Image (spheres, rainbow, N blue to C red):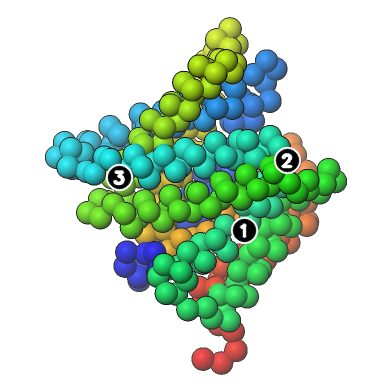
Amino acid sequence: MTALSPSRTPLSANLICMASMLIWAAALPAAEVLIRAEPAPLPPILLNAGRMVMAAAFLLPIWWMVEGNQAVRRANWGRGIMVGSLLALGALLLVFGQTGTSAVMAAVVSSAMPLVGITLEIVLDGRKLTAGIVVGLLLSVVGGILAAGNFDGGLGFGIGALLCLASVITFTLASRWTVTALPGLSPLGSTSLTVCGAAITGVAFALVSLALGYPGPNLDVFGLWEFSALAVYGIGGLAISQLLWIVAVGRLGIAMSALHINLTPFYVMVFMLALGGGWSWVQALGAALVAIGVLIAQGLIPLGKR
């Protein structure tokens, strides 16, 4: 298993993972403010770089204040930047993937993350498949597809979907290696280190895009409101949610933690409902299937006799 040590309190670990997904989902409307604005203040590649810089600027001082200068200096920055670069690459692949397909297709492909996680644990850790894990994974994937909702525009399989899948695989690997490849670091340290690596790589991607002639920031429409949205998206949607996510991965493993990601579309719907959006019973059913799948996969709801 990816977890560094088995969790004695699976309930608390699951609640931490739920909190991570909730915060990430709550930050998505802030991203919509920046993405859907006309004209857009930041093109997608610069938006990703900006949120990563925001997250790094938030986490690095906290890590330094909590654990001290020695912990920051002794960390393996080379390895941390390499792992962090996968986070940045995954975000970039998702941008291009979603551009080439639909948001619904991106959500459907993301529902495969538990399958990617369990495959990694089978291949790298020797995890054994059980009936509970298989049933839980199936429920989670089906529930994630239903929770994505709104299939009226079609799915649009193709290169865009493949790029989204590559993004999922990249993020899953980065999450695993954040826990396993940086021994001796606390969750705060490993998250801060890899997010800093993501920020460095994200800025590099942005500079390359500008050098190639892609659009730059539209400073005329980038005011306090847009800066606030970027801060929410970067600090909440990346720094805080990623920290909680890494804590959960360290306790549950990547496969069991990944089951929770399929609840995100439902959380988004709930937040949008509070802002005047509509309710979908199909998405609610999908969320229920994901929740049941999580409980079955972790053995909290046993299948048959033990």
* Residue tagged 2: 101
> Amino acid under label 2?
Thr
Q: Nearer the viewer, mark 3 or mark 1?
A: 3
On the question of residue 273 being in view, the answer is no
Q: In which quarter of the image is the N terminus?
A: bottom left
Judged from this view, the residue extending furthest toward the bottom is 305
Q: Quadrant of residue 293?
A: bottom right
Q: In which quarter of the image is residue 79?
A: top left
Cα–Cα span, label 2 and label 3 = 33 Å
> In terms of secondary structure, where does tag 2 sit?
loop
Cα–Cα span, label 2 and label 1 = 16 Å
Q: Name the residue nearer the viewer: 161 or 188.
A: 161
> Amino acid under label 3?
Arg
> Amino acid under label 1?
Ala
* Residue tagged 1: 112
Tell me which numbered mark, 2 or 3, is placed earlier along the sequence: 3
Local crowd size for mark 1, using a 10 Å CA cut-off: few (<14), some (14–19), many (≥20):
many
Local crowd size for mark 2, using a 10 Å CA cut-off: few (<14), some (14–19), many (≥20):
many
> In terms of secondary structure, where does tag 1 sit?
loop
Q: Is 122 left or right of 156, judged from the image as shown?
A: left
Spot occupied by residue 182 in the image (x, y as percentages of width and height): 28, 52
